[in-house]
Image: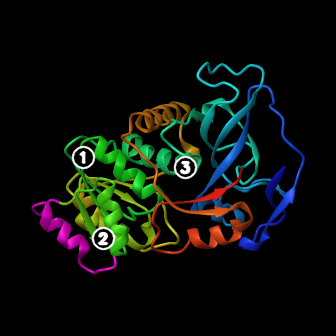
Amino acid sequence: MLAIRIASFGPPDVMKLEEVEPLAAKDGHVLIRLHAAGVNPVDDYIRSGTYAMKPDLPYTPGMDGAGVIEAIGAGVNRPDLRPGQRVWLCRAVTGTYAQQTVAEPIRIAPLPERLTFEQGAAVGVAYLTAHTALMHKARLQPGEVVLIHGASGGVGTAAVQIARAMGAIVVGTAGTEQGRELVRQQGAHIALDHTTSDYLDSLRGMTGGRGPDVIIEMLANKNLQRDLECLAPRGRITIVGSRGALEINPRAFMAKDATVTGMALFNATQQEWTQSLFAVNEGLRNGTLTPVVGEVMDLKDAPAAHRRIMEPGSHGKIVLRVG
C-alpha cells in the first residue's frame, strides 16, 4: 500500500510517499481501508519534532480519517461496527496518511450516508476537540455567550456548530470577509474581524458591558491577556492552541474570578472521549453537525498541505485524498 513516511523530524519535505507492506487486523483492533485523511496543525507540530509527543521513527503521520472497514480483529465488542461499513476515526494506531490504517474500536464511529469520505476525514480532531473544549472543560450552558477565536478553521467551525446546537449565543472571529461569512453560515449570531484592534471592545458593547461567559482560544500567546480583560465575571477560557509564550498580569484572573483551562485531546479521559465521540456522531447523523471541507489535496501533496495548515485565513478543514 501507499503511505507517507517520516524518517526524521524536520520541515514538511521530510514526508515521503512510499510503498509499504499492507496492514492486518490485530486482536482488539479494526483494519480500515482509507479514502481520505484529515490534516491538523498538531500533525505539523509532531512532524517538526517540537511537540511533546514524539512517535518512534519512521512513522506515518495523521490522526483523522474516513474509509471502509476491511477486517475486525478478535475481541472487538462493538456490534455497531462490521466489515464493509463506512466509518470515520480519530487517533489511529498506525497513522492515516496512508491507504490503510489500524485503530482501536473506541476511536471509530459509523459515517452517516449523508456525508462524504472527505467530510468524514474532517470530523475527528476538530469536532472532538471542540466538544471537549466546550462541554468537558468550559461546561457551556444554554443561553451563555461564547466567543470562538479563529472560528473559520476546522476546530472553529466545529465549535460554532456545537455551541449553536447547545443553545448558546455564539460569537466567532475570522480575519477575512469570506471567513466571517463562513462563520455566520455555520450558525454564529455575530462574526467579528479579529484583525482590527477594537473587536473585543465591540463585543463588550454587544453584551451590555458584561463580555462573553466562555472563550475558546486558538492562539493564546496573542490573545489571552485581552481575553481576560473582556471576559464576563466568573467566565471560563479554554485554551485549545498557542504558538509561543506571553507575559500576563495575574490580576486579570483575580479581577474576574476567571477559570482558564488548557487542553490537549490526547489527555481526554476514556469517559470524556466516549461521550464526545457518541455525541458528535449523533450530531452528524441527525444533521445538526456538518463538517466543512476547505480544500482537498492528493496524498503526495502532504508537504504542501502542512505548509498550508499553518497559514492564516483558514476556511474549514484541509483533507488529503487517499483512496
Residue linked to disc 2: 226
Callout 1, which amino acid? Answer: Ala
Say whether residue 196 is magenta.
yes
Disc 3 versus disc 1: distance between alpha carbons? Answer: 22 Å
Which secondary structure, mark 2?
Answer: helix
Q: How many residues crowd mark 2 within 10 Å: few (<14), some (14–19), many (20+)?
A: some
Residue 125, numbered label: 3
**Circles 3 and 1: CB atoms closer than 8 Å:** no
Identify the mark nearer the N-term, 3 or 1. 3
Q: Which residues are magenta?
A: 193-210
Expressed as whole percent of the image width and height from the top left, the position of residue 135 reads 37, 41
Residue linked to disc 1: 168
Residue in the picture at 67% in, 48% down: 35
Expressed as whole percent of the image width and height from the top left, the position of residue 119 reads 53, 49
Along the line of sight, which residue is nearer the eye, 71 or 169?
A: 71
Residue 293 located left or right of residue 255:
right
Disc 2 versus disc 1: distance between alpha carbons? Answer: 22 Å
Which secondary structure, mark 3?
Answer: helix
Residue in the picture at 30% in, 42% down: 165
**296 versus 166 height, above or below:** below
The quadrant holding residue 305 is bottom right
Along the line of sight, which residue is nearer the eye, 271 or 38?
A: 38
Residue in the picture at 18% in, 71% down: 202
Identify the mark nearer the N-term, 2 or 3. 3
